Image (spheres, helix red, strand yellow):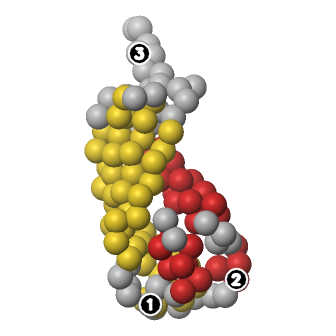
Amino acid sequence: MNAIRWGGVHHSNYLKYFEIARTDLYRARGGNYRDFEASGLFVVVAKVQCRYHVPARYDDSLKIVVEIDRISEAKIEQSYTVLRGDAKIASGSVTLAVVDREGKLQRIPETLRIPLESL
């Protein structure tokens, strides 16, 4: 039997790319997620969507563009575009919420809001 050699990026990795881009954006705007968690608050994903346009291959150089679409009292909505050169590989959106150590929903604190709103 012949083995099929796919060589494409597994679909679950795109959610990891979104998370890396989200963390890098916060860091680039002066935020420190480790300090944020030390305060007893955590950012959690409430909703995620991803659309796959064309496959990425292992070792492709990808660029992930993240945009803040909306920040309300209780959630942050972001959109993502994954590019290989000019080609759109995938696009998606994530809705984030903030919870405390017990998992109780919290208002978006200024320490998170200010770095993200400065875009």
Q: Quadrant of residue 49?
A: bottom left
N-terminal of the two: label 2 or label 3? 3
Who comes first in sequence, dot 1 or dot 3?
3
Q: Residue furthest front?
A: 118
Query: Which residue lies under the disc numbered 1?
Result: 107
Res 42 → quadrant = bottom right
Amino acid at the residue labelled 1? Arg
Query: Of label 2 and label 1, which has the lower sequence position?
Result: 2
Task: Say whether residue 70 is left or right of residue 22.
Answer: left
User: Residues under labels 2 and 1: Cα distance?
Assistant: 17 Å
Which numbered tag is attached to residue 4? 3
**Point 34% across, 72% down: residue:** 70
User: In front: 14, or 74?
Assistant: 74
**Amino acid tagged 3:** Ile
Q: Is residue 69 above or below residue 38?
A: above
User: What secondary structure is marked by label 3?
Assistant: loop
**Residue 41: image location, x then y, percent:** 58, 84
Return the residue found at the far top.
Answer: 2
Label 1 secondary element: loop
Q: Which residue is mark 2?
A: 38
**Residue appearing at x 31%, y 39% in the figure:** 52
